[in-house]
Amino acid sequence: MNILYAASEVAEFAKSGGLADVASALPKALKKLKHNIKVVMPRYYKIDKSKLTSLGEMGVAMGIWGEFWCEVFTCKMGQVDIYFIDYERYFGRGDLYADEHGYSYGDNDERFVFFSKAAFELVKKLNFKVDIVHANDWHTAIMPLMLESVYRYEPLLADAASVLTIHNMQHQGKFSKHIIDAAEVGWESFTSDNLEEFGGVNFLKSGIMRSDALNTVSPKYAKEICTPEFGWGLDGYLRSRELLFGILNGVDYDEWNPQKDKFLVKNYTSKKISGKKECKKDLQRIFNLLEDENVALIGFVGRFAKQKGLELLAGAIWEILHLNVQFVILGSGERWAEGFFNDVANRYPQKVSTYIGYNNEIAHKIEAGCDMFLMPSMFEPCGLNQIYSLKYGTLPIVRAVGGLEDTINNLDNGVSKPNGFKFYEASSKALADTVKWAVDIYYNDKSTFESMRQNGMSEVFSWDKSAKEYEGLYKIAKLKKELKDDK
Ligand code: ADP
Ligand code: GLC
């Protein structure tokens, strides 16, 4: 199939979270299945143009605002062709979605309407006859609607079906209705079963209602978002879709694999695990902690956002500090959390150490150097770090939601092949108790801890399998589109 895959971030070039990992690895896996896939993303300021090839300029109509001229760049991402939309006014900024104070850019609606349209214009520029338009998250969620309105009569898109993957329900792209004129999708789309929500527009809602096929990134999250607790106000619309699939993310084992991870001082495997000790020492050194190979070392990597359960951790940290543990934290985001965990680290420098910021190398070192990895998420569509942790022999301690529930087998009576520790209640007490339990197993039941580690390391969350499921989803989208056309 000919696939146009649009994403606002792709790991090799710009990344804020797991969407970027998926937008890099899934296209490569689909290419291996012989699909003709083209990835498109914005050319953010930090992506070095000099390493890309220019394909020249391209006009993008923005309704009453006229036509905006951008430049298209390209390069290879493995075997996959990736295209960059370069438009200084929208993407020539310090970060992807928000300014240095964490405030979302005020024109994010324009930026991503422009990008979504540019992705379709690219199809014309490349003369690419499309079977599937694959949009991801709110940034490109207006594409299914654009496909059936603005680009309805474009021959290269006449047979194209649309697919929307939801990586996160919390962020929906809610804006003022005035963007409709620039998007050119027509005011008939401003209805409550499409773009309209409380007098404004909601891009994700439109994508949910207009895409030919819809999925999210784990089976459990697909069920959860159909409930008020996890649906962020759109659960009713999700329930109205007859088919909502959950396809678990895979792992790019070329990037996340202790056997060949280029960031580690020593590589290791499940059979020859001694290198993990070296990685632990290296991590302790980097974080200014005592280089003690026996102490239980717990790690956290992630965005400091409500989703990641940092409030639960803040309430539990004092109890955790009573244990014989070291704790390393890498992340940035909400200011209170940055201040709070820095403060804890200043007070307990022998036990807690933080790195506030984004650092891919340190993220890899934490996966390798820790004994346990904490993910106390309030919700988690899939979660990649716990799956990376399994491969690195670092036992996940997780709250049993979404993809965390799907990928972690709790150490529990009767559970075959346990690979981690789970808690259910969204409370600091449940979190603290579970950390205590895991630490107790670490010190006092070494054979169980070791066998859990082996279980995790032998598991494979391959993109090849998930890519086949996406292939199935594309077929369903095509059928749905044909039925629509027949009507
Ligand atoms: P989400 O997409 O919700 O942020 P995931 O677990 O799916 O969560 O993916 C997060 C990805 O981003 C992982 O690859 C993780 O290593 C990376 N990451 C998150 N925060 C940081 C950080 N501060 N520094 C480096 N990598 C980070
Ligand atoms: C989102 C989710 C995360 C998921 C990632 C990739 O940002 O928060 O759980 O793993 O997307 O699908």
Image: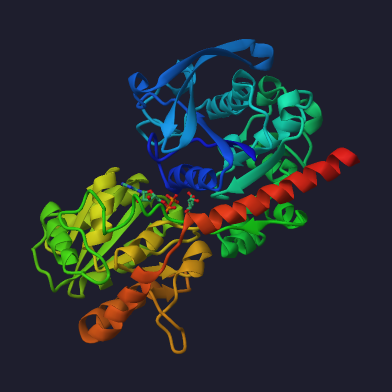
Depicted 88 relative to depicted 142: above or below: above
Residue 350's x, y, as percent?
11, 63
* Residue under the point 19% across and 65% down: 276
Left or right? Give the position of 334 relative to 33.
left
Quadrant (top left, top right, bottom left, bottom right) of the C terminus: top right
Residue 485's x, y, as percent?
85, 38
Outermost residue to the bottom: 413
* Residue 166 appears anywhere in the view: yes
Give the quadrant of residue 144. Answer: top right
Depicted 290 relative to depicted 176: above or below: below
* Residue under the point 38% across and 74% down: 420
* Residue under the point 21% across and 58% down: 344
Give the quadrant of residue 66. Answer: top right
Left or right? Give the position of 425 relative to 438.
right
Residue 208's x, y, as percent?
69, 46
Quadrant (top left, top right, bottom left, bottom right) of the N terminus: top right
* Residue 216 appears anywhere in the view: no
The number of discs equals 0
Task: Please tell me which residue lies in front, 272 or 311.
Answer: 272
